């Protein structure tokens, strides 16, 4: 077998093995590749940066599932860290039935982290005062529209079965007028529905954290200003983590930054495979033309 | 009558919902609010119907003793167990329900999705060949976007991130916008056909 036949017919088991090695290696090596921040991530960060503390809330629509958790979960963690550090109250909500389990983990992770460092009760994050997780609701579109009239009407009880009208935060955060920004973390069409129903009718600002596969679909909404910013895939999450460090909200980056090293190596592997595959293909074609002419 | 009444309700409610969108009067807002609450409740019933459908589908598979009936059995047992665990022990952060979700369903879901990376790598190696001009353009743009979005891209050449961003902002956005407009016009046409009673497939076969 000639060299070009070998490079154009690599066994898939070799490709799978290489991929596994390339994913695992960066977790054992402390590689730090500086991130170039995409404008849409910076736009989202700066929008949140401009929200005054203890005023309007940020609503996180946590709609990712276990399948897309590696990309979207670090986004949720980074956003929660940013909001809580700035003293912005957070309302969590989900319209995907698989999301509440993951949303609770995201809230608990960040709240525990903050409360471990807190010196007193006033420094701590308190459920009902600083943040609320409303849980899952069926009839997504109707619920999105109805929240413009009143959040407690759609969610009479929160995820933990508390009556929402008794929670301090929801006494002052009544509807979209009290929400500075809704950030939709999802892999599906959720952000578009937020724009169609909540933004067009009530003018609420929307940001998004999407899987890299979904992000290209939402560029038109960025250009029109319907999106106040967007995180795209694992890279978007890593960029946000870097911005938190740059602005002094965190001392070190999180899991997305670490996972980006694996993603970078895998992308390089794929590029290498495509290149050698094409070299093999072109050499094979040249050889067949030679054979036909000769 | 069996068909006319639902068609009449659809026409009236459909038109009212369109009109109320443009009238911010308290009566209109109140009407919209009531309808939305009904929709939320009706969606919850749809979930019950979905569960019923799933159960009947899998029970019939088990009864017919099909080769993959064991998967149906696992589905039914898992669904019942999770529902019982949630109802009996609650769904709080430290509950058994949450433990099962985080330690079984989450890793399984992530694993299934992660397998895609293997297929994508193998498929990209086999399928991405410069066979013609179109394939070459696709390959070149994929290369630039991949390199531009990688942290290492900026070190290979400072223009990589900018060109990748341009591809996303201009050619990608133009095509996405075209698709969005197409989908929007299609949705408007379908909605009008349903409201005006031209499209009647939602009524079923009438039997």
Image: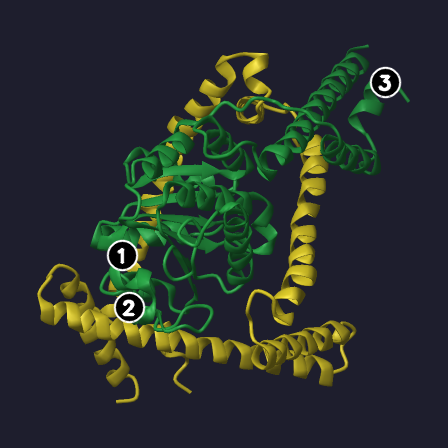
Same chain for labels 1 and 3? Say yes or no.
no
Quarter-wise, where is residue B1 in the image? bottom left
* Residue where numbered disc 3 is placed: A3
Q: Whole-percent x and y of residue A287? A: 79, 15
Chain in yellow in the render:
B
The crowding category of the residue bearing disc 3, from other C-alpha atoms within 10 Å (few below 14, some 14 to 19, many at least 20), is few
Disc 2 to disc 1: CB gap under 8 Å: no
Q: Earlier in the sequence, mark 2 or mark 1?
A: 1
Q: Is residue B174 visible?
A: no
Tell me the distance, in whole angstroms, between the alpha carbons under discs 1 and 3: 57 Å
Q: Residue at x 65, y 71 (%)?
A: B96
Compared with residue A19, is residue B89 higher up or lower down, i.e. above or below? below
Tell me the distance, in whole angstroms, between the alpha carbons under discs 2 and 1: 10 Å
Q: Helix, strand, or loop for circle 3?
A: helix
Compared with residue A223, is residue A116 higher up or lower down, i.e. above or below? below
Compared with residue B62, is residue A287 higher up or lower down, i.e. above or below? above
| Chain at numbered mark 1 | B
What's the mark number on residue B188? 1
Q: Look at the image and name its color scheme.
A: by chain
Q: Given the current orientation, which residue lies at the most extreme right position?
A: A1
Compared with residue B78, is residue A287 higher up or lower down, i.e. above or below? above
Q: Helix, strand, or loop for circle 1?
A: helix
Same chain for labels 2 and 1? Say yes or no.
yes
């Amino acid at each position: 077998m000639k060299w070009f036949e070998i490079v154009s017919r690599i066994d898939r088991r070799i490709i799978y093995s290489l991929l596994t090695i390339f994913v695992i290696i960066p977790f054992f090596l402390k590689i730090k590749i500086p991130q170039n921040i995409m404008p849409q991530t910076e736009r989202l960060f700066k929008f949140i940066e401009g929200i005054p503390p203890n005023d309007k809330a940020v609503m996180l629509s946590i709609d990712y599932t276990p399948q897309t958790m590696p990309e979207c979960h670090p986004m949720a963690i980074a956003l929660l860290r940013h909001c809580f550090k700035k003293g912005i109250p957070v309302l969590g909500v989900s319209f995907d039935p698989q999301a509440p389990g993951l949303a609770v983990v995201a809230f608990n992770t960040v709240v525990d982290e903050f409360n471990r460092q807190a010196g007193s009760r006033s420094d701590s994050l308190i459920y009902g005062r600083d943040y609320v997780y409303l849980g899952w609701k069926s009839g997504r579109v109707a619920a999105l529209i109805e929240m413009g009239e009143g959040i407690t009407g759609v969610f009479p009880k929160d995820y933990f079965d508390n009556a929402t009208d008794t929670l301090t935060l929801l006494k002052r955060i009544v509807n979209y007028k009290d929400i500075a920004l809704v950030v939709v973390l999802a892999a599906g069409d959720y952000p578009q529905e937020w724009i169609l129903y909540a933004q067009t009718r009530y003018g609420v600002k929307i940001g998004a954290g999407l899987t890299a596969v979904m992000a290209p679909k939402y560029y038109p909404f960025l250009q029109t200003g319907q999106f106040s910013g967007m995180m795209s895939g694992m890279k978007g999450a890593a960029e946000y983590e870097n911005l938190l460090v740059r602005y002094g909200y965190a001392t070190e980056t999180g899991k997305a930054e670490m996972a980006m090293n694996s993603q970078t190596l895998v992308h390089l592997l794929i590029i290498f495979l495509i290149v050698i595959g094409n070299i093999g293909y072109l050499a094979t074609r040249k050889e067949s033309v030679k054979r036909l002419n000769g | 009558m069996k068909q006319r009444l639902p068609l009449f309700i659809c026409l009236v409610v459909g038109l009212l919902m369109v009109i109320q969108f443009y009238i911010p009067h308290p009566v209109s807002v109140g009407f919209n609010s009531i309808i939305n609450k009904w929709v939320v409740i009706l969606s919850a019933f749809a979930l019950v119907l979905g569960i019923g459908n799933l159960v009947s589908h899998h029970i019939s598979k088990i009864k017919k003793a099909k080769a993959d009936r064991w998967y149906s059995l696992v589905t039914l047992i898992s669904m019942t167990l999770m529902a019982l665990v949630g109802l009996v022990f609650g769904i709080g952060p430290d509950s058994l329900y949450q433990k099962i979700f985080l330690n079984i369903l989450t890793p399984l879901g992530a694993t299934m999705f992660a397998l895609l990376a293997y297929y994508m790598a193998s498929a990209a190696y086999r399928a991405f060949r410069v066979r013609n001009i179109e394939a070459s353009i696709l390959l070149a743009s994929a290369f630039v976007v991949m390199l531009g979005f990688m942290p290492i891209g900026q070190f290979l050449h400072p223009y990589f991130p900018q060109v990748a961003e341009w591809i996303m902002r201009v050619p990608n956005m133009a095509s996405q916008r075209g698709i969005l407009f197409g989908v929007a016009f299609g949705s408007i046409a379908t909605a009008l056909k349903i409201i005006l009673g031209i499209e009647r497939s939602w009524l079923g076969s009438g039997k």
